[in-house]
Amino acid sequence: MSFPLLTAMAVVPAVGALVTAAIPAAQRTTAKWVALLFSLVTLVLAAVTLVRFDPDSEDAYQLTESHAWIADFGVRYELGVDGIAVVLVALTALLIPFVILAGWNDADPPASSVHDKHDKHVKHEAADEVVTQGRWRPTQGFFALILMVEAMVILSFEATDVFLFYVFFEAMLIPMYFLIGGFGDRAGQLSEEETATQRSYAAVKFLLYNLAGGLIMLAAVVGLYAVTADDLGTGTFSLQQIAEARASGQLDISTNTERLLFLGFFFAFAVKAPLWPLHTWLPNAMGESTTPVAVLITAVVDKVGTFAMLRFCLQLFPEASKWATPVILVLAVISIIYGALLAVGQRDIKRLVAYASISHFGFIILGIFAMTSQGQNGATLYMVNHGISTAALMLVAGFLISRRGSRLIADYGGVQKVAPVLAGTFLIGGLATLSLPGLAPFISEFLVLVGTFSRYPAIGIIATVGIVLAALYVLVLYQRTMTGPVKAGIEGMPDLKARELTVVVPLIALLVFLGVYPKPVTDMIDPAVGRTLSVVDKQDPKPDVPAQDVEAAK
Amino acid sequence: MENLIGWLVAAPLLGAAVLLCGGKRLDRLGHWLGTLLAAASFVIGAVLFLDMLGEDEHHRAMHQHLFSWIPVGGFQADVAFQLDQLSMTFVLLITGVGTLIHIYSIGYMEHDERRRRFFGYLNLFLAAMLLLVIADNYLLLYVGWEGVGLASYLLIGFWQHKPSAATAAKKAFLVNRVGDVGLSIAIMLMFTTFGTFTFGPVLEATGETSEGKLTAIGLMLLLAACGKSAQVPLQSWLGDAMEGPTPVSALIHAATMVTAGVYLITRSGAIFNAAPDAQTAVVTVGAVTLIFGAIIGCAKDDIKKALAGSTMSQIGYMILAAGLGPIGYVFAIMHLVTHGFFKAGLFLGAGSVMHGMNDEVDMRKYGGLRKYMPITFITFGLGYLAIIGFPGLSGFFSKDKIIEAAFAKGGTEGWILGLTTLLGAAITAYYMTRVMLLTFFGEERWRNAATRSPNAPSAEPAAETRGEHAEPHPHESPKSMTIPMIVLAFGSVFAGGLFSVGDRFVHWLEPVTGHDHGDSPLSATTVTLSTVAVLIVGVSLAWAQYGRKPVPVVAPRGSLLTRAARRDLLQDDFNHVVLVRGGEHLTRSLVYVDHKLVDGVVNGTAASVGGLSGRLRRLQNGYARSYAVSMFGGTAVLIAATLLMRAV
């Protein structure tokens, strides 16, 4: 048997989490380096996976692993990746080291609580759980939790057994909950106590929304088992088995059952993604958590939702997916426009990025359910590009916020005069967010729009309004924070430091590279998208007058 | 030879990358590097031009395929270039005039501490514009198209510490983005209609598809052209774009950016030829804008804004000509090239005047400057004669041809268009004479008056940094600035004649754009004589108003039209009330709705199912105990569900 690469990619960060958590309180720096090291090893494994993956293979899933797990009711430990999963795994493995590096100092115990007795006193009042200094290890916990999330996200991308997927899809809520609730940024105008209250509200809201989605999905998972048990004799959760059984006609789900099951799955993914009107947890969660955690939410964890729509909703319930398409497309377009308009109206930098993300998730879902090869290629590419561009924009925003100690746009002005590199990188992150051609997100956004337009012209045209609104919220943000006269409190702001540049420069380089030469990624995705579309039995609309035919005729 | 095409873009792009990433080390040499790479691009263009001349006229198009850009399913976009006579004309104009503007900027931006970055942006501008004109498909053209938008954003807002500059830059980008939506919808329509968006196949297949589709594509392309070329109704950014340093205005108005719309329409000629309704829309936009811009040009006291109105109007001529179909394409491009010379010359001249006048821009505070800056006077004067169409100079040949072509359109439409272009020519003569008289003739109105109160925000903040607020001492500009002006003046004088002798320009472009003489109700001589007649009327009117009488330093209140024209014919007031105010109300109420309604309803619905809302509210108390309970609750539900399933 060959080396279980897919398992290893999840085990490495999981072990890393345990090791990091075990490091003594005093050795905070060691803990950071250990966490970074484990995330880098994972990245190397992801690179190996990319190389070993053969985009032209006939198999639906590659590098598969399969072991019995809960034999009683057909749950297996089955992993495998297609072209879509493999790039998303790579994206996750790529972003985590940057998240760790960007959050290097975010979870240090406040220096004040060591040096300043008064502040320490306040701290005690705010949270009654502060233990003695010696055992309190927030830094270790922070990085261990991040690695834990990485492990679970990677397994969610790899699982080809529905139940296995469900377990990790839900389990990742636990570390995320603690990351949001336990580590806010110290950048509020409010008192420590109020900040803590808001933070815990955001964390609980995140948890309850996602838990509610998960519970409904659980019912659908059970239902799926019951249906397969009825038709096949033994129940199964294996994607491949179910697909084969459907193809051979052995498994025949009645229309109503299929629709109900679809809705159960889709609801959970729509909460995670998030789709309007289930989005309201995201601005709270991203606003209150530290910027690296906000990036983790929007760039990595939420992608599981849109990915799962492609892998589970479309492949398990193709007919129901087509049935629900009109409603989903409308919700997606609402997300695009609504998210962008709300981003324009925000006063808080992080909430602005959160609403922008809601708009972008609208594009991703639009691309998935347009069910054209351009749309789904675009949607998958969008997941990758949005991850990178949001990471770039949000992490630079985080560096900015940590310098001034405020999230409010109104507290900034004229930053480009004192910190030109910071302003420049912020602008590039912003330009990527508004999908400027030449940077990666343009390609995915255009593919989604073309793919949607070729089947639903009206919806495609409405969605283009998002292009203008994106320019509006990005440029207004840039203008208010970076240009104009230097505001009080900005004068001495230092420019980006070496560690921060290490985070930003590779992300920007990647945005440029994938904007100019996305072929390596599209080559991975394209065959997988073709397979998905053949499962749902949809072909691309044909052009009216194919230009090749005209040429051939001449 | 064809492998050189890519270097046209690569040279300035490399310059932009090095200058913007290079840091302070390059401060001393950066402007030379930027100028050198712009010149290199011009040399490559010239080499390719000579090579092209050697070919027979139907085999002049060159192609270079670099790599497959976006290969997805049936959607194939390549990074590939096409250099034919039309692209070549633009390449030489962009790189030639662009290089002169680079040279001029060395002197003009000498005292600016961010000069290196300025040259980086200039190089980026050239690279984007060159990509736009040599792309062989609409999607790659779109990259250059938005790249131009980005470069103009960076340059208009170059003095970002001034809020007005930052606002103008943002406005330019946003208005352009509205146009860009048009281009992206046009590309999508092409893809669904033809299955491709490469020039060759699309333009060849136009005969096979319905007129309705082509009209839709044409209208979307027109929307795009309106954004980039500042045509009504997307013209509002152009006046504000004067916030950028003056060489930027010259670059935007002469060699790059605003000419892109004319290129797009001419390039897509096959589509418009088969969609007469779209053509009518194009000529209408052109005709309206040419009058609109001219009226604004008459009322502005700011020299740069008067010239901006003039650009809008002249581009209107070109769009109108392009809308005429094969009768007009060649002349649209010919006017574009001659306009490139004289408008660049006029803007550089205006910059030179401002340079010598403490960056004052109000023409009412100029006067009698011809004695103090003779070179600027002569070069600006030649540009002036060229733009009003003085017989024998460049503008005369190109504008006269457009007027002829407008009449040649035939029918009532031809008469309306022809008379509109004649009226435009009269107004052009009027407002340009006004600029000339106010600036170089008459009393020296700048004497005994500090040109600028220290409190008034300056358009060109270099003056503030130099601390000059006293009476100006007008002086000629340094050589690095005057030499480009002299070169451009030569172009303003001779280019038109050179192109027209033996119809050289027509023969040059005809293989690409096609050409048709149309059916003019008037003879060429009649048209020329009418043109000269309206020219004399326009000049005389301006002379009567500004030459014979002394000019007040403070502008009189003026008629309703004048006051409206000073406010750009109320376009901004409209935008402000409808879009800005309306948008603010919309977003603000949406923020409220999202917080109170959407959040509330979703929480509420969940509450009726599982008590979510109540728990959420109680959990706001912030005590760790409560989260622990909720966590425990969640986990318990999870485990219970798992066990339950076992029972199934």
Image: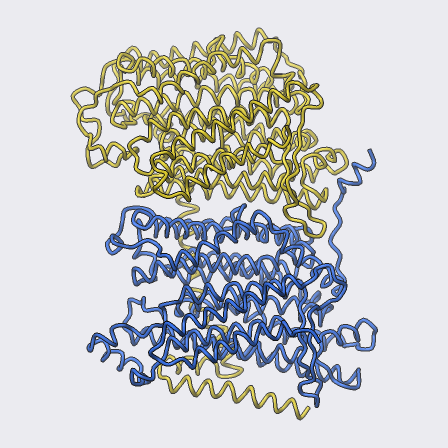
Quarter where residue A406 is shown: bottom left
Left or right: where B399 falls relative to A325: left
Residue at x 61% of width, y 28% of height:
B266
Q: How is the image coloured?
A: by chain
Assign the C terminus of chain B to one quadrant of the image. bottom right
Front one among B558 and B314: B314
Q: Which residue lies furthest to the bottom in this view?
A: B647
- The number of callouts visible is 0
Where residue B31 sits: x, y (%)? 38, 32
Left or right: where B634 falls relative to A486: right
Query: Vertical placement of B236 versus A51: above or below?
Result: above
Q: Residue furthest left?
A: B448
Front one among A343 and A513: A513
Query: Vertical placement of A116 versus A485: above or below?
Result: below
Where residue B28 sits: x, y (%)? 34, 35
Assign the N terminus of chain B to one quadrant of the image. top right
Residue at x 39% of width, y 44% of height:
B576
Q: Is residue A260 visible?
A: no
Colour yellow, chain: B
Residue at x 74% of width, y 64% of height:
A536
Front one among B462 and A24: A24
Where residue A479 sits: x, y (%)? 37, 48
Query: Vertical placement of B259 versus B443: above or below?
Result: below
Quarter where residue B383 is shown: top left
Where residue A50 sits: x, y (%)? 63, 62
Q: Can residue A492 be seen in this view?
A: yes
Q: Chain A is drawn in which colour?
A: blue
